[in-house]
Image (spheres, helix red, strand yellow):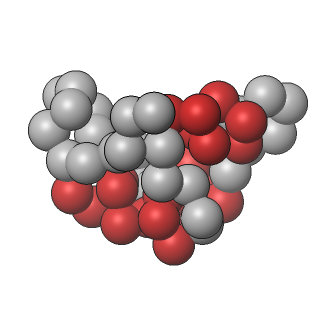
């Protein structure tokens, strides 16, 4: 299981990892589960998503 950390891909910054962790999203699997039908709060509160 891949644990999310800044630098894994260009869009995954340290700030984004902090937002995801604040919403209990810590692995690639939890990203997929959270995004399968509804936007996560981290996506909605991130300045790039706005």
Q: Residue drawn 85% across and 30% down?
A: 37
**Residue 3 placed where, x, y %?**
37, 44
Measured along the vertical axis of the image, is residue 50 above or below residue 14? above
Q: Which residue lies furthest to the bottom in this view?
A: 22
Q: Is 15 left or right of 1, judged from the image as shown?
A: left
**Residue 2 placed where, x, y %?**
39, 34
**Residue 18 placed where, x, y %?**
36, 66
Numbered label tally: 0
Q: Residue drawn 14% across and 38% down?
A: 7
Residue 11, visible in the rendered structure: yes
50 vs 40, nearest the viewer = 40
Q: Is 34 left or right of 5, judged from the image as shown?
A: right
Q: In which quarter of the image is the N terminus?
A: top left
Q: Which residue lies furthest to the right in this view?
A: 37
Q: Is 14 left or right of 32, judged from the image as shown?
A: left
**Residue 25 placed where, x, y %?**
56, 55
47 vs 10, nearest the viewer = 10
35 vs 3, nearest the viewer = 3
Q: Residue drawn 47% across and 65% down?
A: 21
Q: Which residue lies furthest to the front in this view?
A: 1
Measured along the vertical axis of the image, is residue 8 above or below residue 22? above
Residue 49, visible in the rendered structure: no
Q: Residue drawn 82% across and 39% down?
A: 38
């Amino acid at each position: 299981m891949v644990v999310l950390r800044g630098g894994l891909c260009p869009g995954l910054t340290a700030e984004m990892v902090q937002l995801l962790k604040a919403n209990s999203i810590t692995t690639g699997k939890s990203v997929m589960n959270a995004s399968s039908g509804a936007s996560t709060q981290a996506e909605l509160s991130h300045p790039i998503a706005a």
